[in-house]
Amino acid sequence: MTPAPIQILVVDDDPDLLKLLSIRLRSAGHQVAAVASGEQALATVAAQKPQLVITDLRMAGMDGLSLFDVLHQADPALPVIILTAHGSIPDAVEATRRGVFGFLTKPFDSKQLLQQVQAALNLSAASAGITEDGGDPWRKDFITRSPKMENLLRQARLVAPSDATIFIHGESGTGKEMLAKAIHRASSRHNNPFIAVNCGAIPEALLESELFGHTKGSFTGAIRDHKGLFQAAQNGTLLLDEIGDMPLSLQVKLLRALQDREVRPVGATQSIPIDVRLISATHQNLTEAMKAGAFREDLYYRLNVVSFDIPSLAERREDIPLLAAHFLQTLAEKYQRKVNGFAQEAMELLVGAPWPGNVRQLQNVIEQGVVLCTGTLVPASLIQKSLQENVGGIVSFEDARRHFERDYLAQILKVTNGNVTRAARLAKRNRTEFYKLLQRHHLNPSLFKPETQ
C-alpha cells in the first residue's frame, strides 16, 4: 500500500525542537515527516517528495543552506523555509538570494510560521497544478512518472501565471507545442487565443507578412489588408516554433517588436500596439547558431527569460509503458480493434528501443502494431517490424523539408565541385542567400572541392 504523501519535511538536529515543530504543524492539520540531519532529509526526499521542507540552518554535517542547494538543484519549485537561532541580516539576504522561500529566527512566532507554511504549500500546490478536487487539468495531455518531466511540469506551472517570455528546447517529437499549450491553459490569458506558427515551414518571403500582417497593395497579390499572427493572438499566447529557422533579417524585426510591444504590417506607416505572451521553441542548439552568426545574441536573451529543456523519450524510459498503454487504448478505439495489451517481449523491445523520433515515433509504432495485430496482444514481431521501418520515426513536415534542403544543397555542391557562385546560379538564388542556406545546414563548400594532386 502506498504511504500517504508527505506535505512537510522538518529537518533539525535538536530533538526537542523537532518534536515541538512536528506537534504544531500536525495540530494545524498538516502531514509531517521529521528527520535529524540533512543526509536523512535527502534520503526521505528520494523516497517520497514533500510539498515543503523546513530546515534548521546550523546542523552537524550538512547545514540548512547546503541541503537547500541540493534540493533546489533537483527541484527548483520545491519551497524551503530555513530556521535559525543565529539569525542575521546577512544570513537572510544570502538565503533569499539563493531562492529560499522563507527565513525565520528562533524562537519563532507560531502564527508567523504557520502563515509562511500555508503560503509555501499554496505555492507548491500551484506549481504542481493541483486543483481543489485533486485534479490537474492544465497538464491533462502529459502522461508521465518521470522525475525529470515532473520537475519540468512543476516549474512550468509555477511560471505560467506570469507574462514571462518562455523558451522551450527539445528534440523533435518530445512535445514542445504541447508544453506551450499547457502553459497557456494555466495562464491568465487562457480565455484568449493560443496561436502556433512554424517558422521553418513558411517561405522567408511570406513569413514577415504572416507574423506582422500587410496592407492592401503592399506587394503583388496583397488584395486586402491582412492581420498578422501577433494581432490574431492579441491578449493571448503566440508560439514561434522552430525559431532557429527564422532568417536573420526577420530576427531584427522580431526583436524590435518585442522591445517596443508593437508591430508594423508590411506596407504600413503606423505601428500597432500588441499585448501577447510569446513562447519560442526549437530543436536546434541556438548557442552554436549564435557562434556561427545564424542567430542574433540579443534576440536569444530576449526570448530566453525562462527556459525549459524537454527530456527525450530515451531519458524518461519509465514513461514508455504508460505512454504505450495510453496509445494502445486510444488507437484500438479509433480502429475498433480488440487489442488490449502487449506481449512481454514486445514491451521489452519498446522499453529498450533508442527512439530518435521520441513520443511521436512511439505513437506511430504503436499505431502500426494495433492496425496489423490479429490477436488481443501486440506481438514482438510487429513491434520489431515497425521499429525497423521507422528507424528515424515519422518525421514532421518541417524536418522532412530541412533534410531535403540539406541533401539538395550537398548535391549541387558536388555537381559544382564546391563552387558557390555556380551552385547559387543552378539553385536560382543570389550568392548571399545561398551562403545563408549553407550556414543554416552547416555545409562547408571547401569540403566539396576536388583534391589537388
Image (spheres, rainbow, N blue to C red):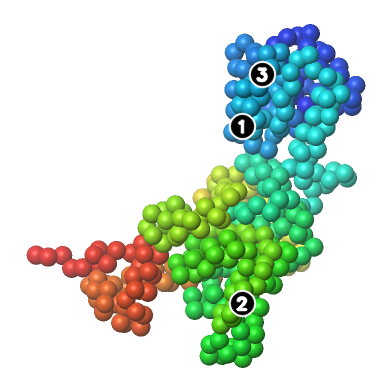
Q: Residue 410, can we see it?
A: yes
Which quadrant is home to the N terminus? Answer: top right
The circle drawn on residue 88 is 3
Which quadrant is home to the C terminus? Answer: bottom left
Which residue is at a point 66% across and 22% down the rendered structure image?
89
Which residue is more in the foreground, 204 or 302? 302
Tell me the mark number nearer the camera, choosing from 3 and 1: 3
Q: On the image, which quarter does residue 34 sit in?
A: top right
Horizontal relation, residue 150 to residue 220: left or right: right
Kind of residue sitting beneath label 2? Gln
The answer to whether 444 is drawn above or below residue 424 in the figure is: above
Kind of residue sitting beneath label 3? Ser
Q: Residue 175, can we see it?
A: no
Residue 289 in percent (x, y) is at 42, 57
- Work out which residue is located at the far left of the displayed protein and give it: 453
Residue 90 in percent (x, y) is at 62, 22
Residue 49 in percent (x, y) is at 71, 31
Which residue is at a point 24% across and 71% down the rendered structure image?
418
The residue labelled by disc 2 is 270
Along the polypeptide, which appears first: circle 1 or circle 2?
Answer: 1
Along the polypeptide, which appears first: circle 3 or circle 1?
Answer: 3
The circle drawn on residue 97 is 1
Which residue is at a point 77% across and 56% down the rendered structure image?
188
Mark pair 3, 1: CA separation = 14 Å
Are the residues tagged 3 and 1 within 8 Å (C-beta)?
A: no
Q: On the image, which quarter does residue 266 sit in?
A: bottom right
Q: Secondary structure at mark 1?
A: helix
- Work out which residue is located at the far front of the displayed protein and give it: 270
Q: Secondary structure at mark 2?
A: loop
